[in-house]
Each structure stands twice: as structure tokens, then as C-alpha cells.
Image (tube, rainbow, N blue to C red):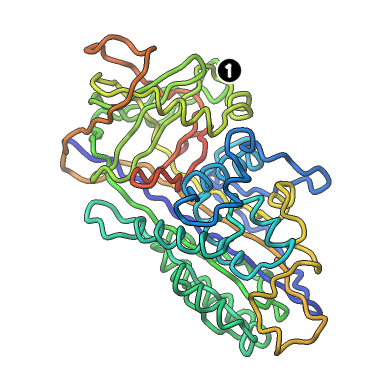
Amino acid sequence: MNVKNIICTVVICVLLFSCIGCIGTGTNSDSELDPTSTELEIGNISSPSINVESETVDKSSMMYAYSPGDYDIATANNAFSFDMYNNLATDGNIVFSPYSIFTAMAICYNGAESTTQEEIAYVFYYPLSKPVLEKSSKEMMNIINSDDDNNDLKTANALWVRENYPLNERFVGNSKIYYDGKVTNVDFRNEPERSRDIINEWVATKTNEKIKDLVPDDMVTSDTAMIITNAIYFKGKWLNEFDVEETQKELFYNSSSNEEGTPIDMMYTKQYFSYGENKDAKIVELPYKGDDLCMYIVLPEENNIENFESRFRLSDYNNLKSSMESGNEVRIWLPKFKFDTKAKLSDTLKTMGLVEAFTGNADFSGIFDIQKVPEDYALWLHDVVHQAFIDVQEEGTEATAATAIEAVDSCLPLPGEVMEFKVDHPFMFFIEDKRTGCILFMGKVENPLY
């Protein structure tokens, strides 16, 4: 019986705002996680990191793009993806959606002014022209959210605002027009617990019940002014099937020192795939049904993921993809894996250069109506929480045809030779929208537990 492999990915990003005189003190609770969960709290505020993609992406051309035609939002998103990964990388499994974070912050950016705006633009590769980002974001969202009978891929934005808070009408209008962000008034001040429940119910609904209780008990307080949420949910079937009867226990070596290996569930198939390689890594494209989305598996040549990820940049990723050719059969062994990652990104973003936005000196005066607040009023980011869930498993009963992508590479074997791609040590993965070239999800697997 041929059974298609299904990947289910869920992400939620939350931005929490505080205002002067009502500073929130909530942090994530130390709730117990299951063994397949990863909780990250990373950052070294005193030592800002360098944007590692600044060498390969012209940041100034991004910031000073004054028309949508001059701004490549997919490249901006992807450059940010690698910057974020470089700061999140730690031992263990990781999954996150750079697109979710990129989009949630874009809504926030809509209300940023002065040096706060410049700081956010620098870290996120945004154009200083807000209309350029708004129009580019809307076009991207329309493509990603377009109806597709083959896969379930949807994004959603929401703004949760304290009752009677004097929002700037232009900010509200642009959030709705360009990001489809609905504003909901909640009683943070008198009913913080009920407000938390409302937000968590929205999160659970938008993520098909995969993420529950994202906002912990002590995050929402009577001091909370506004919370911005972005959710992205994806469920898709492989175009090339895995046979469930071929899934066997195989050894996975999660480090070069692990000579005995760990038994894991390894799937297997032999099909025509786009495949590439260089001296550092191999790559294979696993297309989803409909061929609008795909997963790229990047397998380092050496079993040393720490060394590999510290050197692997967007330019390396693009070069590796450009080495791919179709026309060869590939035997693929891929582990089943399922895990989630919950990260508090405030400190991480500070290390990347987003500092002023988290202080009382932040200028988010585009968010509120300056005519209805005291002269010394200030609003700033208090917390950013991100959670992602990924599940790769066998489901379904139909087989479908393979697809091919045209590319060139000088290091591949002669046509007709069967390639082997055995994922038996830590690897990186990327889920990409092929229509736009935008990285939606990325991460690494060191322990493919299921």
C-alpha cells in the first residue's frame, strides 16, 4: 500500500506592547514540555551580533527601495531567515517560521517612526518607504493564501487592543487593507485572564488545535496595551509517495561521537527528484502535491551540524539549490519527525540590533492617536513570543506522479545513475513557496524522535 507523507506545520508569533506608566512584567511560565518540545530563551544583549547576510544581500538597496518593483520581499525575508537562524541555533531540534515573524513585525513597523523605524528596517531588511512594504506584503499574502485544493496553507493576523485605547485610524486601516489584520478590543485592564483565553482560543482555531495556551498566565496583565498575533498553518501531501511498508527502524547518528547510533523510524522511496551537491552538503527537493510548495533537505557531508550551520549562509543555500538537476532517480531515506519549538525572541532581536523598540525611547507614535494621549506618552515592545510545530508522518492512500525542475550542475553524475540520499545524521530543512521563492519555515533535526 502506497501512503503519502504529510507534513503539518504550525506557527504563531506574538508581539506584546507596553506603555509608559503601565509596564507589563509578564514572562513565559516554566510549563513542563514533552520530550519532543524545545523551549528557547536566547540572547546576549551586551554583544550585538552582525547581520550575517549583509555580505551577500545589499541591505541599502532594500532599505532605499521606493517602489515595489525595486524591492524583493522574498530575498528580504530569506536574508532575515538566516540572520534569525544564526541567533537561534543551539543544541537540539529547531523549527520556526521567519515569514511569520517577518509579517508580524511588518504590522508593528507600520506604526514605527524616526530611529525606531530605521532600526526595525535594518534588522528586517524592510524598505524605509512603508507603502512599498505594505504593497509587497499584500501581494505576497495574496499568493500564499490563494485557494489550493492540493494543500492547506493559510496565514492570519490579528490585533488585540485594550478597550478604549486611542488607536490611530490610519494604522488600523492599513493593518486591515495590507495585512488583513482584524482589530479586537479586549479588557486587558479588568479581565486579563479572560483576554488571554480569547487570544488563545483564536490561536488554537487558526492552528487547527495544534498550539494551545500559547499565551501563559502571567503574560497578559492589566498593564498590557496591545498584542499583535500572526499564525501560519500548513498541511501538504508529498507529490512522490513514501510506502509505509518500507518504513523501518534504522540507525541515526546524532553526532560524530555517537558510534552506536539511535534506532529511529526511517521512511524510504525511490523516485525522480531534483538533486544537487557540493563539497559541503547534498540537497534534495521534495515537492508537495500541486508543486507550489516544496521542502528542501540539506544534508551536511560531515556529521557536524554545529560547524556546518555556523558557516551556512543564504548565498550557500542558493548556490546549493542552483546545483540541482532532475533526470536521475534518487533513493531517499528520510526520518519521521515531530517536535515543536517555543522561543522568546525579545533578547534575540536585541542581539540582532533591535534595541530602541524595547525601551521607553521607542517611537511607535503611528500606532496611537497623539491627540488623545498625554504629551509624554510612550509605547514600546515588551515581548515577542514565537511557537512552531512540525509533524512529518505517513497518511493517505494514493500515489501521484513525480515532477522535475530544470537546473544545471557540473558535479553531478551521468544521467541514469541512481543517487543515494540517506539522512542518517543531523540535517537542515526548508519549506519554500516556489511561486515567490519565500522561505516559510526552516529548522534543523538533530533527534528525529516520533
The answer to whether 215 appears left or right of 19 in the picture is left
The answer to whether 324 appears left or right of 256 in the picture is left
Q: Type of residue at label 1?
A: Ser
Q: Residue at x 55, y 47 (%)?
A: 37
Q: Quadrant of residue 336?
A: top left
Q: Nearer the viewer, residue 214 or 239?
A: 239
Residue at image mark 1:
256
**Can you name the residue that lies furthest to the front here?**
66
> How many circles with numbers are drawn on the protein?
1
Q: Nearer the viewer, residue 251 or 41?
A: 41
**x and y percentages locating residue 14 in the rendered image:** 58, 64
Quadrant containing the N terminus in the rendered view: top left
Quadrant containing the C terminus in the rendered view: top left
Q: Residue at x 36, y 24 (%)?
A: 324
The answer to whether 119 appears left or right of 8 in the picture is right
**x and y percentages locating residue 196 in the rendered image:** 58, 75
* Vertical relation: 353 (above or below) 405: below
Pointer 1 local density, CA inside 10 Å: few below 14, some 14–19, many at least 20: few
Q: Secondary structure at mark 1?
A: loop
Q: Nearer the viewer, residue 183 or 374?
A: 374
Q: Residue at x 31, y 22 (%)?
A: 325
The answer to whether 406 appears left or right of 301 in the picture is left
**x and y percentages locating residue 422 in the rendered image:** 39, 21
**x and y percentages locating residue 446 in the rendered image:** 53, 32
Q: Residue at x 63, y 83 (%)?
A: 162
Q: Nearer the viewer, residue 91 or 369?
A: 369
